[in-house]
Structures are given as structure tokens and as C-alpha cells.
Image (cartoon, rainbow, N blue to C red):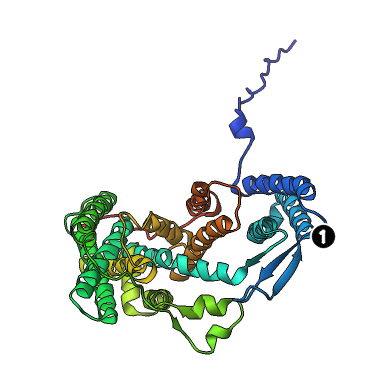
């Protein structure tokens, strides 16, 4: 009689609920849109009458525009939210791209949905929204470009906030002193802008000296510069600006004939002020220089593999120094936007974190000039949206509405950005072999 050895079943691995439930970025936003759509479907018919309309005006007079049936539009968008969310949760990998773009469209519809519901029974001006969005995005886009120039060469620059703040203060201090001395307003403004650019460049040179020459941790170096800028500008404001009697005036807008008459975007793009126009020029110039010139090719090579660039005869140290100083000069010009182009005054910490939002815009744009501009426009639009909500009398405390751009920053960095690839040598000190 033959005997068989007993067989044992392999142990069943114990898995936790975290391993059984996989939460993806796509699934998270799908659930959010389903819940939002269901909430609109339930609440909109209770609070909005069937004959209520919203007028979206598109001209400066606020008379001409598009009349939208508020309840009908809300229900259609809510159904798209629910359908898109359910479709995105279906386990069909072949339609992943289609699911993604459906959710993107749902996200874009969120802005008009909120505006139309909040302005139900009245009107809201789209042209003003576009104008404010482009205007408020100016320092963010310029700050993102400043970060892009430094990080393309491999130097992390979180000191953009401090460089912007220094440029804002020094530019306005020089302008104030010149006006007090009797210099003409236009000359004083021009010299103030130049001073802001130089101030940003000097702060950037300090960052380059610490992080490139002495190989200090680049994040620590940037943090030190931000703290230094807060103390320096506060001192200058107390010692110079508080007792000055200079007139508080800003740069005058420059309308471009013909182009200003384009519907909706004409006023937003072609009736701006000088620093706003310089932002548009800088986006185009940065793209051309970084991708179509020898200097840009060498900069990107230094940012990706500085040792390989060094073996080819590229001066890595000089390249990084130059790009960091260019970064600071752009940030200083962005600082001048706050004082010389917008408010005509200087307050402590008036940049209000725009430098850090600019870094988020740069990451959102995947370290490209046009991508950074798109990210800056997104954050500028979110800030303009918060202001529009206050104007329309939304029953939410103003402090919460002022948080909108920062909440958008968190959402974009935590949820919307997929795999953003920075230059490989970004933040790595260069040691010449």
C-alpha cells in the first residue's frame, strides 16, 4: 500500500483595506464631480426659479451679452458631472484618456457654473473677469519665469518671493526719493523700475554666491534671502516711505490701436500697462532663448548633466551664475508690478506669497515658459474669481474668498499635476572633477 504525503494549501496573504482599495487621482476627482453634480441637481430646483436668467455681459458698458437660463444650464452641467464621474470610475483602461478629458471639461465648466448661479437674476461681466485674470496673473507668470531660468540651469530658487519683495520696495523707494527731489514723474517711474530690476539681481547674486560658489543648501539659501527681504524692506519702509510726501501714482495704460477693439479679450490683452506687456514679451523671449539658441541649449545641458556639459567645454559655474541673476532681475521686475504699476504704495510683505504660487505655476507648466504662463493664468483667474464673488455679494466671509488662489494651489499640486519632471541636476551643487 502506497501512502501519499499530505498537501497543504499555500497561506492566503492578509491584505489590509488600503491594499484592496486603490485610490487614484482620476477616481478621486470622479467621486468629487459625482457628489457636486448630485448636490446641484438637488439644490438648484429648490433655490432657482424656472424663469430666472443670468446675463453674461461682454462689453465695457455691461449692456450687451448672452442671456443664460440659470436653472437649465445648472441641470445640464450637473448631469455632465454625474455622467462623467460614473464613466471615469468604470474599469475600462482603454478609455482612460477619454475619461481624463471629460473630467477636464467638467473642471472648466465649474467656473461658469458658479458665476451663473451666483449672479442668478442679475448680470456679471466676463470682459472684466478676463481683464482682472490677466492683470493678476502678471507677477505670478513673471515669478514662474524667474524660477524657470534658475532651475533650467540646475539651481533651485525658492527665493523668488524675497526677490520680488525687494524689487517692489527698492523700486518704490527710489521712485519716491526722485519725485520728492523734483524729478519728473515719468523719469522717476522709469528709474524706479530699473532699480527694482537691479535689486532683484543683487538678491539673486547673493543666492548664487551662497548656493553655487559656497555650495550651501539651495533651499536654505533661498529661505535666508526671503527672511532677509522681509527685514530689509520693513526697515526701508519705516525709515524712508512713512515720512515721504511723494504722490502715489502708477504707470499709465498703453492701448494698442485696433487690437483693443477685439471682443472680450481686446481690453484684457491690449489695454495694459508696461510691465504687463513686458510679461508677455518675456514669455515669448524665454521660450525662444531656452529652446532655439546656443545659450539655451547650454543652459538646459547644465541643468540636466553638468559634468557632461563641463567635459564639452561649457563653463558650468558661469552659466549658473548668469541664469540665476537673470532670474532675480525678472523677479525684481515682477516686484515693481506691485508698487509702480498697481498700487502706487508699498506695504510690508505686500507680495503675499505670490513668489511661492509662481513656483507652483512653474511646476504646473512642467518647467516650460508657455506651460508656466498657463499655470500663472490659472492662479490669476482663481484670484479674480475670489474678487468677483465678493463683488457679487456671496454670503461667505471675505477671508475665505481671499483663500481661493491658495486653495487652488494646493489642489493643483496635490491632485491635478501628474508626473512633472524637473531638470535632473536641479538643486545639486556642481563639483568640478
In the foreground, 317 or 289: 289
Task: Say which residue appears at 29% left-offset and 57% top-offset.
Answer: 162
From this view, report whether residue 398 is shown above or below residue 208. above
In the displayed structure image, the side of residue 87 where residue 115 appears, left or right: left
In the displayed structure image, the side of residue 429 where residue 141 appears, left or right: right
Report the residue that reaches farthest toward the bottom. Answer: 258
Q: Name the quadrant containing residue 3.
A: top right
The quadrant in which the C terminus is found is bottom left
Task: Say which residue appears at 52% left-offset and 47% top-offset.
Answer: 400
Q: Name the quadrant containing residue 149.
A: bottom left
Q: Residue 356, position in %: x, y? A: 39, 55
From this view, report whether residue 313 is shown above or below residue 419. below
Judge whether residue 315 can be spotted in this image: no
Helix, strand or loop at mark 1: loop
Report the residue that reaches farthest toward the front. Answer: 245
From this view, report whether residue 407 is shown above or below residue 391. above
Q: Name the quadrant containing residue 295.
A: bottom left
In the foreground, 283 or 267: 267
In the foreground, 382 or 45: 45
Q: Residue 349, position in %: x, y? A: 32, 54
Judge whether residue 94 can be spotted in this image: yes
The quadrant in which the N terminus is found is top right
Q: For label 1, count other residues whose C-alpha is less than 10 Å away and answer few (under 14), some (14-19) or many (20+).
A: few
Q: Residue 180, position in %: x, y? A: 20, 72
Task: Say which residue appears at 80% left-offset and 59% top-offset.
Answer: 72
- What is the tally of numbered marks visible in this picture? 1
Q: Which residue is mark 1?
A: 51
Q: Residue 160, position in %: x, y? A: 32, 59
Report the residue that reaches farthest toward the right. Answer: 50
Amino acid at each position: 500500500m502506497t501512502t501519499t504525503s499530505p498537501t497543504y494549501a499555500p497561506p492566503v496573504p492578509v491584505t489590509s483595506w488600503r491594499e484592496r482599495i486603490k485610490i487614484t487621482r482620476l477616481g478621486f476627482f470622479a467621486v468629487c464631480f459625482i457628489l457636486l453634480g448630485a448636490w446641484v441637481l438637488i439644490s438648484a430646483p429648490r433655490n432657482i426659479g424656472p424663469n430666472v436668467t443670468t446675463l453674461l455681459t461682454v462689453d465695457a458698458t455691461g449692456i450687451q451679452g448672452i442671456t443664460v437660463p440659470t436653472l437649465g444650464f445648472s441641470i445640464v452641467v450637473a448631469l455632465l458631472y454625474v455622467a462623467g464621474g460614473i464613466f471615469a470610475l468604470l474599469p475600462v483602461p482603454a478609455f482612460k484618456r477619454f475619461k481624463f478629458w471629460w473630467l477636464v471639461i467638467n473642471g472648466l465648466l465649474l467656473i461658469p457654473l458658479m458665476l451663473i448661479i451666483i449672479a442668478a437674476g442679475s448680470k456679471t461681466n466676463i470682459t472684466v473677469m478676463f481683464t482682472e485674470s490677466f492683470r493678476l496673473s502678471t507677477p505670478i507668470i513673471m515669478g514662474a519665469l524667474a524660477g524657470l531660468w534658475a532651475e533650467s540651469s540646475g539651481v533651485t530658487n525658492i527665493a523668488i518671493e524675497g526677490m520680488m519683495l525687494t524689487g517692489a520696495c527698492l523700486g518704490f523707494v527710489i521712485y519716491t526719493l526722485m519725485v520728492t527731489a523734483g524729478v519728473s514723474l515719468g523719469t522717476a517711474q522709469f528709474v524706479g523700475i530699473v532699480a527694482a530690476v537691479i535689486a532683484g539681481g543683487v538678491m539673486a547674486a547673493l543666492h548664487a554666491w551662497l548656493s553655487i560658489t559656497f555650495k550651501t543648501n539651495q533651499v536654505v539659501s533661498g529661505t535666508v534671502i526671503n527672511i532677509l527681504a522681509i527685514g530689509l524692506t520693513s526697515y526701508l519702509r519705516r525709515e524712508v516711505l512713512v515720512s515721504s510726501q511723494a504722490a502715489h501714482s502708477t504707470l499709465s495704460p498703453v492701448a494698442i490701436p485696433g487690437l483693443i477693439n477685439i471682443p472680450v479679450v481686446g481690453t484684457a490683452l491690449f489695454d495694459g500697462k508696461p510691465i504687463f506687456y513686458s510679461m508677455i514679451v518675456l514669455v515669448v523671449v524665454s521660450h525662444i532663448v531656452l529652446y532655439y539658441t546656443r545659450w539655451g541649449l547650454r543652459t538646459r545641458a547644465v541643468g540636466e548633466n553638468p559634468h557632461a556639459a563641463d567635459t564639452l567645454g561649457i563653463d558650468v559655474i558661469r552659466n549658473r551664475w548668469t541664469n540665476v541673476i537673470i532670474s532675480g532681475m525678472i523677479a525684481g521686475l515682477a516686484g515693481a508690478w506691485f508698487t509702480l504699476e498697481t498700487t502706487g504704495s508699498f506695504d510690508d510683505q505686500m507680495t503675499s506669497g505670490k513668489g511661492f504660487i509662481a513656483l507652483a505655476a512653474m511646476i504646473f507648466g512642467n518647467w516650460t515658459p508657455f506651460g508656466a504662463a498657463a499655470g500663472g493664468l490659472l492662479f490669476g483667474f482663481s484670484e479674480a474669481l475670489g474678487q468677483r464673488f465678493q463683488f457679487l455679494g456671496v454670503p461667505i466671509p471675505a477671508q475665505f474668498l481671499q483663500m481661493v488662489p491658495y486653495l487652488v494651489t494646493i489642489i493643483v499640486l496635490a491632485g491635478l499635476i501628474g508626473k512633472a519632471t524637473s531638470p535632473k541636476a536641479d538643486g545639486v551643487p556642481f563639483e568640478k572633477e
